[in-house]
Image (cartoon, rainbow, N blue to C red):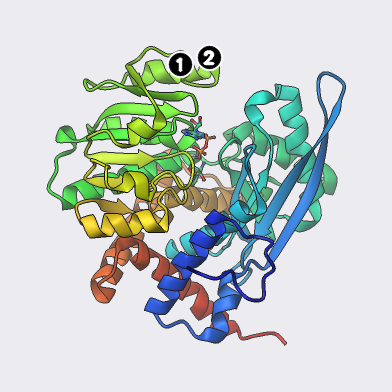
């Protein structure tokens, strides 16, 4: 098992951070990363913890813990989402920041990885309380973020509205409007066309490419999607556009299966009205665990990390596993899937890279105050996805390794090269 880096304390120790470290170690071994570089590459450069006190509607004040981890500063500002979820820990945030680093480098973006989070259940908050958490978290981070320092974005439990409040809080502090401080904002305050759908649509585009490579027509393919938030629902809509039949969806409230095809518009309307799929009658009800084992062409985990474990890896009945979520497959499950050899994996740092690519476009547009059309954004996105995907296939052939290791070695190798070129200060 991978060790937590020696220079680190147990600060980040958690299943998910160990998982990210072990992936790093495999990739670094494969491309022979210099031992002197390994800890510098692996350990996060900075982490900030904050307390977020918020007065609730009932008059009481509650204090939530928040984090921001900036993984490396070698290629430019850091970039990554902010997660509001009751189980957020600093170890999880650090692992997600590490994956962001390799993802940005894989796509050729001038960023290091970052991630943030607040241990809070946003579904239990009123709109006013959610605004207070969002603004106070950003207020605490003001010395540590900025367009040239660290640029947050949405992740699980946060959305365009949360980004607008964060942008407004930062802008009020500095005295002028600073749209480039966060991405994933509403278009009215400097957001980009195409950003909302970028992650899910990007994943669907890569799925289409994979089906083509396997000689499967989209019209003959079915998809099962876990998670029906931003990423899962946008992936479902884009897959439907390509002709793929989405036969099951789920969210935290459970799953729905309809072999004839899920009515996605009705599901979206239900979520808009009730904040979840709970109570919807669009198919046979099933648990999230059962959903993962449904027979389908493409399985798309688009919710949490570590949902494909040794216990269910042998029972998956998909041809393609498209990791729209970050870290959905544990390392041990990965080994089982490799032994099986009948499931093609589109690894997370490639599969969901569309989100940060269009976040990068948003940041560039904000800095230039020059905005692109949706057609331009999506065309540029597809060309970066094609380039990243082709590079992964070439690396895989060169090293004779899995698609995951190919993607990781490309990302890690590029950061290692930049660190070597810049040298070690002092
Ligand atoms: P979201 O909050 O919009 O949606 C999350 C969905 O997952 C919701 O439907 C929620 O009900 C569901 N969910 C939560 N816990 C669950 C559980 N235990 N079982 C089943 N479903 C559960 O979040 P999102 O932005 O769509 O993010 C989803 C995943 O995609 C995360 O892993 C995130 O890190 C990753 N991701 C997001 C982006 C982005 O641009 N938003 C970019 C890259 C990766």
CA gap, disc 2 and disc 1: 6 Å
Q: Which mark is residue 269?
A: 1
- Locate residue 378 relative to residue 398 in the image: left or right: right
- Which residue lies at the image location 64% right of the left edge and 69% below the top edge? 73
Asked whether 67 or 187 is in front, the reply is: 67
Where 129 falls versus 58 (above or below)? Answer: below
Q: Quadrant of the C terminus?
A: bottom right
Work out whether 204 lies above or below 68.
above
Residue 209 appears at what percent x and percent y?
A: 24, 49
The image quadrant of residue 401 is bottom left
Mark 2 residue crowding within 10 angstroms, few (<14) / some (14–19) / many (20+)? few
What numbered label is drawn on residue 308?
none
Badge 1 marks a residue whose secondary structure is helix
Who is closer to the viewer here, 384 or 292?
292
State the image quarter where residue 403 is shown.
bottom left
Q: Nearer the viewer, residue 258 or 245?
A: 258
Quadrant of the image occupied by residue 161: top right
Residue 109 visible, this orientation: no
Label 2: which secondary element: helix
Q: Is residue 291 above or below residue 320?
A: above
Q: x and y percent of residue 190 in the render?
A: 62, 40
* Residue beneath the point at 30% across and 71% down: 395
> Which numbered marker is on residue 273?
2
CB atoms of marks 2 and 1 within 8 Å: yes
From the top left corner, tell me how far across and down residue 251 is, in percent.
46, 28
Q: Residue at x 47, y 49 (%)?
A: 326
Q: Residue furthest left?
A: 215
- 95 left or right, relative to 283: right
Report if residue 60 is visible in the image. yes
Q: Residues within 10 Å of mark 1 (few under 14, many from 20)?
A: few
């Amino acid at each position: 098992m991978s060790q937590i880096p020696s220079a680190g304390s147990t600060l980040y120790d958690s299943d998910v951070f160990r998982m990210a470290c072990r992936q790093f170690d495999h990739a670094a071994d494969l491309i022979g990363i210099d031992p002197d570089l390994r800890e510098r590459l692996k350990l996060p450069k900075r982490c900030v913890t904050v307390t977020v006190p918020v007065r609730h509607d009932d008059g009481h004040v509650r204090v939530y813990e928040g984090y921001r981890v900036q993984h490396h500063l070698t290629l430019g500002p850091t970039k990554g989402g902010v997660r509001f979820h009751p189980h957020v820990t600093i170890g999880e945030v650090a692992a997600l920041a590490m994956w962001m680093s390799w993802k940005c480098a894989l796509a050729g973006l001038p960023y290091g990885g970052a991630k943030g989070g607040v241990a809070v259940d946003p579904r239990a908050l009123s709109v006013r309380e959610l605004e207070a958490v969002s603004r106070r978290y950003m207020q605490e981070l003001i010395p540590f973020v900025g367009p040239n320092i660290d640029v947050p974005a949405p992740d699980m439990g946060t959305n365009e509205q949360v980004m607008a409040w964060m942008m407004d809080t930062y802008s009020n502090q500095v005295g002028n409007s600073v749209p480039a401080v966060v991405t994933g904002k509403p278009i009215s305050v400097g957001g980009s066309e195409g950003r909302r759908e970028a992650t899910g649509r990007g994943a669907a585009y890569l799925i289409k490419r994979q089906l083509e490579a396997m000689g499967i027509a989209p019209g003959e393919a079915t998809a099962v999607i876990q998670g029906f938030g931003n990423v899962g629902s946008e992936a479902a809509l884009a897959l439907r556009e390509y002709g793929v039949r989405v036969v099951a969806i789920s969210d935290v409230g459970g799953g729905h299966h309809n072999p004839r095809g899920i009515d996605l518009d009705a599901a979206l309307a239900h979520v808009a009205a009730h904040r979840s799929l709970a109570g919807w009658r669009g198919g046979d009800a099933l648990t999230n665990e059962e959903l993962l084992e449904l027979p389908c062409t493409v399985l798309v985990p688009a919710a949490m990390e570590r949902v494909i474990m040794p216990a269910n890896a042998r029972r998956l009945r998909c041809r393609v596993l498209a990791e729209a979520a970050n870290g959905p497959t544990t390392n041990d499950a990965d080994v089982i899937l490799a032994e099986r050899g009948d499931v093609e994996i589109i690894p997370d740092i490639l599969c969901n890279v569309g989100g940060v690519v269009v976040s990068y476009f948003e940041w560039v547009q904000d800095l230039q105050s020059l905005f692109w059309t949706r057609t331009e954004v999506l065309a540029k996105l597809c060309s970066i996805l094609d380039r990243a995907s082709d590079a992964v296939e070439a690396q895989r052939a060169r090293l004779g390794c899995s698609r995951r290791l190919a993607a990781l070695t490309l990302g890690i190798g590029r950061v290692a090269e930049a660190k070597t070129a810049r040298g070690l200060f002092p």
